[in-house]
Amino acid sequence: MKLDTKAMRYLTAEDWRVLTAVEMGSKNHELVPTPLIAQISGLRGGTGVHKCISNLAKVGLIAKVKNAKYDGYRLTYGGLDYLALNTHRKQKSVYSVGNQIGVGKESDIYVVADESGTQRVLKIHRLGRISFRTVKANRDYLRNRSSGSWMYMSRLAAMKEFAFMSVLRDNGFPVPKPIAQSRHTIVMSLIDAFPLRQISSIPEPALLYSELIDMILRLARHGLIHGDFNEFNILVEEEPSSTGAATSTSKNVSDEPSILPVDTQFADASSNISPSSVTLVPTLIDFPQMLSIDHANAEFYFDRDVSCIKRFFERRFHFSSDEPGPFFSDVKKTMGKDSKRLDIEVEATGFSKKMAKELEVYMREVGVDGDTETEDAPEGDRDDNEPPSADEAEIEDIVDEQLQQADVAGEATEPAIVDTMENL
Ligand code: ADP
Ligand code: MG
């Protein structure tokens, strides 16, 4: 879904009031009746409110819906995007919007910039937009719920991601810097790096491997499991080592670029940084599915995180560790010792257990399972009454349509090249 910010500049203060009124009205109305919009916006009398409604509908920020009882309007994803962007603009966290750099199943990623031109990343959560596992079930599910549920759930996903990113960052984990959250969106620092998925070779896989396994273990000691720890969600930066000598993380003694991207179109970008010695710095992203080590299926997700990394290093770098594990049982023993429980700290940020549960149930019902290749969900995570999955073809059609709309061809492309920043 493309984020078209053009109409933003032409909206009047009254249009914004009316858009906000539709948002407020949709908290307890599936369709917000026109008189209620007028009432909430405080723009009663005259044709003012009708003009605003028609302006907003024309640019697709609200949509008219006819229903048996009454006609009304609902907020569209576009409308919600505008409200969130307007908040980011007012708070000065976003000044301009650039290229889309990622389109996931449940999110869109854009490069944005602040007033000084510093680039950042805007992640827009779009839960319920699509379910790969059970498209039909998803539709029925959504049809039976209030139309506000996708909005609410996307907001919960953004809140959760922001809460975890903040707590992780405060505790020294290598994650992007969380900058702002509004509704279903978050703004974070841009990591100028390739996802591990796009890297074809590295000089010393063992070093990066052990660093990643250490990260999984460190998370677990703090009471957390990432739940989608894989090559899509690890960005690897190549930093010149300041001394030129061997570094703790990794080094490259030749003059060749230390990491080689899979796709040749990235070769130039990568080979730009080819000092004689570099450090590979991993950054972890994508947190909506994080879980506590006390979760009923913690062991399944812990093992899956570990095996994703093992499998990827074997397939891509032909590296396998001599050491077995790590195993969940070992982790449980050391947990909490000398490390505070961050799962508990997250709750203190306002992202409550109740919200976590609501989001988890929804994500499970609509089949959200991160970027990890589908494997059987653990016992208790599957609903035996689940309707059969939609046809592959149907899923492909929906994805194609979305990619076309998003105007991007791949999962993720090189970040940081922004030629068309659109000021808000
Ligand atoms: P999804 O939930 O859709 O998988 P992610 O948070 O994993 O969303 O982001 C998708 C892609 O967008 C990533 O694989 C990465 O290429 C890019 N991306 C996300 N966040 C950042 C960031 N802070 N800096 C640079 N690239 C990012
Ligand atoms: Mg991801």
Image (spheres, helix red, strand yellow):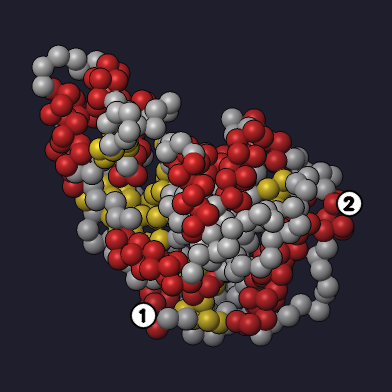
Q: Mark 1 or mark 2, which has the lower sequence index?
A: 1
Q: Is residue 354 left or right of residue 53?
A: right
Residue 43 x %, y %? 20, 17
Q: Within the image, what quadrant is residue 227 found in?
A: bottom right
Q: Is residue 372 left or right of residue 75?
A: right
Q: Is residue 152 left or right of residue 407?
A: right
Mark 1: few, some, or many residues within 10 Å (few <14, many ≥20)? few
Say if 247 sits above or below 85 in the image. below
Residue linked to disc 2 = 333
Mark 1 to mark 2 CA distance (whole Å):
46 Å
Residue linked to disc 1: 265
Q: Secondary structure at mark 1?
A: helix
Q: Quadrant of the C terminus?
A: top left
Q: Secondary structure at mark 2?
A: helix
Between residues 67 and 214, which one lies in front from this camera angle?
Answer: 67
Q: Residue 18: percent from the left, percent from the top?
A: 24, 27
Q: Residue at x 27, y 31 (%)?
A: 71
Looking at numbered disc 2 in the image, what kind of residue is underneath it? Lys
Residue 410 visible in rendering? yes
